[in-house]
Amino acid sequence: MDSSQSQQQQQQQQQPQQQQPQLQQQPVKKKETRGRKPKPKDEKKDEQQAKKMKAQQQPSVDERYTQWKSLVPVLYDWFANHNLVWPSLSCRWGPQLEQATYKNRQRLYLSEQTDGSVPNTLVIANCEVVKPRVAAAEHISQFNEEARSPFVKKYKTIIHPGEVNRIRELPQNARIVATHTDSPDVLIWDVEAQPNRHAVLGATNSRPDLILTGHQENAEFALAMCPTEPYVLSGGKDKLVVLWSIQDHITTAASDAAASKSPGSGGSIIKKAGEANDKTAEGPSIGPRGVYHGHEDTVEDVTFCPSNAQEFCSVGDDSCLILWDARTGTSPAVKVEKAHNADLHCVDWNPHDDNLIITGSADNSIRLFDRRNLTSNGVGSPIYKFEGHKAAVLCVQWSPDKSSVFGSSAEDGLLNIWDYDKVGKKTERATRTPAAPPGLFFQHAGHRDKVVDFHWNASDPWTLVSVSDDCDTTGGGGTLQIWRMSDLIYRPEDEVLAELEKFKSHVIECAAKP
């Protein structure tokens, strides 16, 4: 008996070892623990046990996805699913390129984080955005989750020197984007001027049009572009917030070049390599306008005040929200201690109301702050706490269309759409959805794993793009989804009822005709 038991144990121990090489071949990225420090083994065991218990109580990922897919024709005005070969950590809308009768063409930026067999890339794609009330319900539901979408077509590939962790576009110039990778530098790209590259093993990296230096350690995630000036803001592991002005690199040559071109063609605000300040083979570089000290741990996200380029805020793993004013020096203007009960992953400033700021955290919550009353007895005092996610919140963003609406995505695979105007009001229709958290009015459940990034479309305000890192669930890459909820969901109830009455009257008239 003893010998047979020992043989069984040896066989059981050998089984996972045989599977191990297959797991190592999958492109599992180290960014999966984004914003969280490694935990002791005992804590990890406790967490795993807690997750197993929760999984037994809640529907499985496949069950939730199947239920969601059955409701797609009812919930969505348009939906496109694009399967990615490699994981992606960032997706952003670019400029609108063309308007047509039934759809518009628009730039889309995303990344491909490979396993090393081919280079990492920054992808510029063209996306066909179907206009509201054009797509038929049966077409919306008939998508293949394992295929690439015909609405998304790759336009250009830039071979990126390292993984693309974050992409941000410059509002003042549609050609310019900034990227973060695992380095202290911020990379600036003129996506129209960059040559299209083939991502094959051994290919050299594309050369950035500009490199922003100033961090002392890696700056991986915290990145923002200013809405009013060509400023770039970054945060990193060095606990610093760093500010640059791309304006510092503009020359009269750029305006002369633009003047010589046909009207409307525009010119790049980035100097061509070799014009000046070309110190390295990687590309020209500039130093910061300001370096700001105040955080005690990694800075995870930054954002500008929408109306003032001199004001910005940051959040980090020290659980702090800090407001800065470049006019008053490099120390915090206001420091909010314990803004959350855990690391802060994301922050966004309301583009319609300068007083409102939202933050997302590893404590699974989103908090709404008023800058006029940020603290109480030295501790963060939010206006409201939005609690609907079951895991760490990774991204938050205000709607470009409605001042009270914002979105949040998390490691639970959900992208929630909230309206703080509906908190505590009867218009929430609580009788229909008694389990819904206050303020939550739409839940996008089309992703099977953590939703690492999303972006509202400013050209089509109720259209969003979202991306999930599905390598844990599917053993593959990521999933990019472009979607627009039905307008019956977000329009005022009295407006919807009035339209239904019109439709009802029209049906009666048609039925009465001989």
Image (spheres, rainbow, N blue to C red):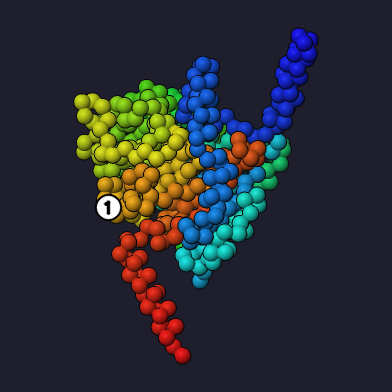
* Residue that appears at 41% across and 61% down: 487
Question: Percent position (x, y) of residue 498?
Answer: 33, 70
Q: Quadrant of residue 301?
A: top left
Residue type, mark 1 in image: Lys
Query: Foreground: 261 or 403?
Result: 403
Q: Quadrant of residue 319?
A: top left
Q: Is residue 244 visible?
A: no
Question: Percent position (x, y) of residue 182?
Answer: 54, 31
* Residue that appears at 37% across and 70% down: 500
- Per the image, the residue denoted by label 1 is 426
Q: Is residue 16 visible?
A: yes
* Residue that appears at 62% across and 51% down: 145
Q: Secondary structure at mark 1?
A: helix
Determine whether, in the image, residue 107 is placed left or right of residue 241: right
Question: Percent position (x, y) of residue 23?
Answer: 68, 30
Determine whether, in the image, residue 484 is placed left or right of residue 121: left
286 above or below 16? below
Determine whether, in the image, residue 290 is placed left or right of residue 179: left
346 above or below 218? below
Q: Quadrant of the N terminus?
A: top right
334 above or below 512? above
